[in-house]
Image (tube, helix red, strand yellow):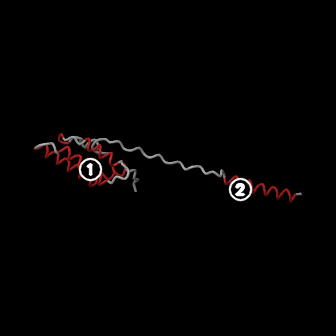
Amino acid sequence: MKDKTLIIFITLFFLFSCFAFTGNSTPKPTPTPKPSPKPKPNGCGSGWNAPIVPDKPFGSDFTDACNKHDTCYSTPGKSKKECDNQFNKNMGKVCKDKKGKKRLKCEVSRVIYHRAVKKKLGKKAYDKAQGKKKK
């Protein structure tokens, strides 16, 4: 009788252990991480330099070109080079109707802004807008 009780006890213990540690047979779905909100266009400049980069250098209004550039940076799959080249073209459209010294000032500003984002200043903003993590 004691042997039969021991066998039943061991069997029940074994079965209980199997069910207790396997848990629910239906796995819980892994929560999908929420994408970080896309940066909103904010005119010219980003991060620390936003307050010091004018939207209208020497009276040439680059606000729309800068906002389109911000939007391009946050578009998945768009390359930085593609966005920077489009930025340069959009600023060129602002300069094309200007005459004399105003045109010269506009073109100089365009070159400076384009080189700034093309070389170093645009990389961090691009990576952040694309959701790339720091290494």
Residue 82 appears left or right of 60:
right
Task: Inspect this view and state whether residue 47 appears.
Answer: no
**Where is residue 7 shown, x and y percent of the image?**
82, 59
Image coords of residue 101 (percent x, y): 11, 44
Left or right of residue 92: residue 33: right
Q: Secondary structure at mark 1?
A: helix
Quadrant, the C terminus: bottom left
Q: Number of marks in the image?
A: 2
Sequence-earlier tag: 1 or 2: 2
Name the residue at the right extreme: 1
Give me the residue at 24% from left, 41% from top: 55
For label 1, the crowd category at 10 Å Cα-Cα, with few meaning under 14, some 14 to 19 and many 20 or more, is some
Question: How far across and how far down the image is residue 3, in percent?
Answer: 86, 60
Q: Tell me the amino acid under the disc marked 1.
A: Gln
Left or right: where does residue 106 sit relative to residue 78? left
**C-alpha distance separating marks 1 and 2:** 63 Å
Residue identifier under label 1: 86
* Category of crowding for the residue at label 2, using alpha-carbon neighbours closer than 10 angstroms: few (below 14), some (14–19), many (at least 20): few
Front of the two marks 1 and 2: 1
The residue located at (21%, 50%) in the rendering is 112
Query: Where, quadrant-wise, is the N terminus in this rendering?
Result: bottom right
| Quarter holding residue 51 | top left
Place of residue 125 in the rendered image (x, y in percent of width and height, measured from the top left): 33, 49
Secondary structure state at the residue bearing disc 2: helix
User: Which mark is on residue 18?
Assistant: 2
Is residue 130 shown to the viewer in this render?
A: yes
The amino acid type, in three-letter code, at marker 2 is: Cys
